[in-house]
Image: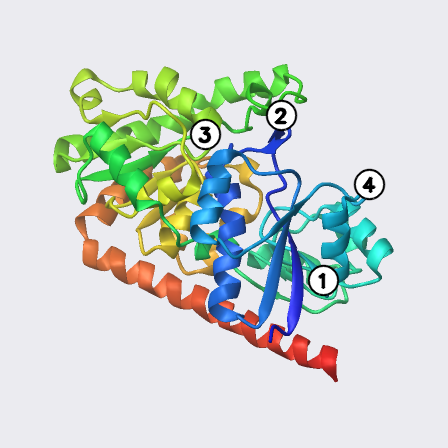
Amino acid sequence: MKQLHILLREFRKTVIDGKVVNTNIGTTAHGPGILSLFEKYLPECDIRIWASAPLSPEMTKMMSRSFPHISFVYGSLKEPSPELQEAVEWSDMLFIGSGSCILENDVEDYIKISGKPYAAAGIGYNEDQFPVMQKGAFMYFRESQALADAEKNELNVPTGFLPDGAFAFDTPDEATAADFMDLHGLEEGKFVCCLIRNRWTPVWEYCPEAKFDPKRDAYNKSMIEQDFAPLVSAVCRIVREKHLKVLLAPETLPALALSRDIFYNMFPADVKDFLVVPGHYWEADEALGVYRKSLGIFGLEMHSQVIGIGNKIPSIVCRTKEFGSKSDMWKDIGLEEWLFDFDLETDRMRFPDMVMEMLSDPAGSRKKVENANRIIDRAFLQFRDFMREYIVSRHS
């Protein structure tokens, strides 16, 4: 018998035409990642997912294939559907999974309606949300800086470290990934993945209610040459010295056009022949299936690399100040050598050499990844032990 009924608040980001849609494979991976974590480490927990709206057909297919036994409820507790109301009554607690923040209104509504506890794990720290964090049964943070900030400010609830749930995302769509590779002429072990992004995600490009921000747009454009130059240098060396293909992999929907219209055109003709620019965006499970066939991942993103490390793929993170503290995850799991601050010229200059070292020393890279996963697994086990003590305390 399941000992704890958890209502997991996930799939809460972009809603378009009444459906939750995937515009960021990292955000999409949080849900299936945290589910995999619970199923592996805490099978005594029974989980239902509370999503903002029904999932898109593509996301529904992903979840149905990997987690056919997981049920969904949708909507808001301001005017809950009978299904959502029943799920609240069924639940023992509300659980906020991985992500940067807590949805305060949902938490407050849940507590008010049910009188039951809520908790969060694998999250970032936001000082503005300190009051609602203090109401949690426990708070587990995804990086040491977030945990330190919470403890410094005397959160006064049980706290700990739980790596981002996307580390546990392990359900690839291998068939769709194989079709993608065939379409783009990619062969297993003969390509690497490079990711780019703007400093600020241009949400106005895909979210109907988001207004165009001229200041952020101008800033994004002003930083492209500085931010992309080290990646161009690394890719050119990979092509010319290793004769490998490079997939310009889109973690976010806006990155697809950014790669096609700007990044690709920054390369000389002899290198362009080795570049692959996808013609369509993809779901997280398709991306994982492709990543698993690559030699490594690098670039100006975070969660493709999180997914990569969790699946034993060498992965280098390039950060800027807009990342906040989430890039500290790489320090926390022993991969500081693979973390580059692109606001620092010294890091931008030495970055291409590290990419080449990662690819030229597969045994050394594999050891780094194995060490990182030992740290991640240890943190998952510590969270398991905490949760089991929590479950026991509820029944005592």
Residue at 84% across, 62% down: 115
Is 74 in front, or is 152? Answer: 74
Give the labeled residue for mark 3: 197
* Model colouring: rainbow
Structural crowding at the residue carrying mark 3, measured as other residues with C-alpha within 10 Å and reported as few (<14), some (14–19) or many (≥20) = many
Spatial separation of the CA atoms under disc 2 and disc 3: 26 Å
- Badge 3 element: loop
The residue type indicated by label 4 comes to Glu
Badge 1 marks a residue whose secondary structure is: loop
| Residue type (three-letter) at the residue carrying disc 1 | Ser
- Residue that badge 2 annotates: 17
Q: In which quarter of the image is residue 160?
A: bottom right
For the residues labelled 3 and 4, the Cα–Cα distance comes to 37 Å
Q: Quadrant of the C terminus?
A: bottom right
Do the numbered discs 2 and 3 sit on residues whose CB atoms are within 8 Å?
A: no
The label number, if any, that marks residue 79 in the structure image: 4
Tell me the residue at 43%/41% (across/down). 284
